[in-house]
Image (cartoon, rainbow, N blue to C red):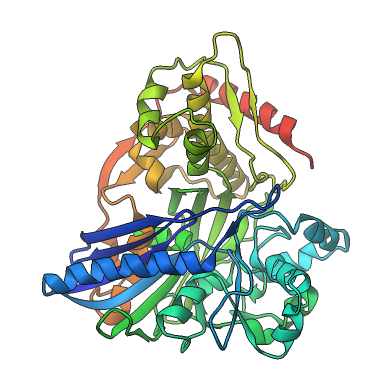
Amino acid sequence: MAHLLALDQGTTSSRAILFDSESDSYAIAQEEFSQYYPQDGWVEHDPREIWETTRRCCEEVVLDAMKAGHSIAAIGITNQRETTILWDRATGEPIYNAIVWQDRRTTSYCQSLKQKGLEDVVRAKTGLLLDPYFSASKIRWLLDNIPGTRARAERGELAFGTVDTFLLWRLTCGEQHKTDATNASRTALFNIHNQAWDEELLELFDIPRSLLPQVCDSADDFGVTTLFGESIPIRSMVGDQQAALVGQACFESGMAKSTYGTGCFLILNTGAQALSSTHQLLTTVGYRINGEVTYALEGSIFVAGAVVQWLRDGVGLIDSASETESRAESVNDDHGVYFVPAFTGLGAPYWDPNARGAIFGLARDTGVNEIITAALEAVCFQTKDLQRAMEADGVRPTNLRVDGGMVANNWVLQRLSDILGAKVDRPTVIETTALGAMYLAGLQVGVFNGLEDISSRWRCDRQFSPCWRKLKRDERYELWLDKVRRVRTE
């Protein structure tokens, strides 16, 4: 039986998941990798470690398939978006660490462009704001701060890629330098309306055109890898949040999903219309299939599961993420503690890169469990921020499909439903980023017959409905907004 392999390269770990033709996972391998914080607000990864962890995970699941006599019909790649890598075209060696999407080192540069009145130009073409989050300013930083880099780039010796492109280069031994429209749409260099790299933006950021990869559909021919004992075609690449949109089968305009990984990303399908937000949300490419673009409206939260990781690794309040559910269940609703986890600034709808985290409402009887509960509630309140912004733009998601590691926590999803005042649906498969990459690869090689076929495979594991009354919901949210105001700098 032909299987499909999804490579899910995330912010904290690399995974390879092998799916059978019934969309069930057959084998999984996962490795965490190092996080580097050279200065306040800086976040880096070692691209070599990203590649090696991905390669080892691939080898493990391909070996499992071969032992069982299964062939692999295609590979799909999904990745942490915006994270920026430059490498030598001749050797494939990175010239510096990957600058991660969370990184805020280019804040001053972005603010200088804003002061020149250039944000409207960027937003009109890309649907994005002028913010350190996106790849363009990160590329510019590398060109200006790593000795010799700009000269090498101008001679055509270097290549740029988000993580998908870097992995593809390594998988194909340097034969393919490509990305897809979803990842390109997160660079702030790609015109989402004419679907091309934009010369005016390249000039604005002073980035040589020769650095950039070819932009393809999300389901397309991305070459072949021969690294794992057989020739395996690579047939999809898609940014992780758009992959989750596909994995959640949100194919109709108005459908929305929210993914709770390191960050939280709420994306609403707007169909063929690139809806422009007036409330600090992003317009982005949802997916591109057969040359047809489906757009989406997105709200991005920088810290979701990362706050649980901080509770575990940063301050040692928990031993594992799984224990947060029982800890929160033991705390009363009126505990009075609020946690704004602005470790690397605030994302949508505030876009304040200089904000920093704070805990409010500590009292003599406050304990570890109250702090844990407030951290989990912060993820829910931040989602409410995005819901309110979408509502102000005229598109309020009242039913939300959720996924990612955090949604295994029933307490979180019930509190999310209470705070949103909306139904929350958890699918039977919560790792929908890998599922989406797999679906797109399978679509390209004919394993699936179309989007309707994929949509029919979505299954709800459990639906959560709100229990709080509107008055309680509104009162708690107003208190949250007050705490956010206190940490903001803009």
Q: Residue visible at 61% across and 16% down?
A: 362
Q: Nearer the viewer, residue 309 or 190?
A: 309
In the displayed orientation, state which residue is furthest to the top: 364
Residue 331 versus residue 6 in the image, above or below: above
User: Is 465 placed left or right of 92 in the picture?
Assistant: left
Q: Does 230 appear above or below 395?
A: below
Q: Quadrant of the C terminus?
A: top right
**Image position, residue 222 (x, y; %):** 41, 83
Query: Residue 465: which quarter of the image?
Result: top left
Q: Nearer the viewer, residue 293 or 324?
A: 324
Could one spot residue 461 in this view of the protein? yes
Residue 149 place in picture, x, y as percent: 72, 78
Residue under the point 35% across and 24% down: 326
Does residue 206 lie above or below 342 as drawn?
A: below
Counting from the top left corner in percent of width and height, residue 135 is at: 65, 67
* Rendering quarter of residue 389: top right
Q: Is residue 190 left or right of residue 254?
A: right
**Would residue 58 be found to the left or right of residue 344 on screen?**
left
Q: Position of residue 451 (x, y in %)?
A: 32, 69
Residue 272 in view, yes or no: no
Q: Which residue of the protein is positioned furthest toward the right in this rendering? A: 116
| Quadrant of the image containing the N terminus | bottom left
Return the residue nearer the eye: 209 or 39.
Answer: 39
Question: What residue is rendered at 11% in x and 70% in y?
Answer: 68
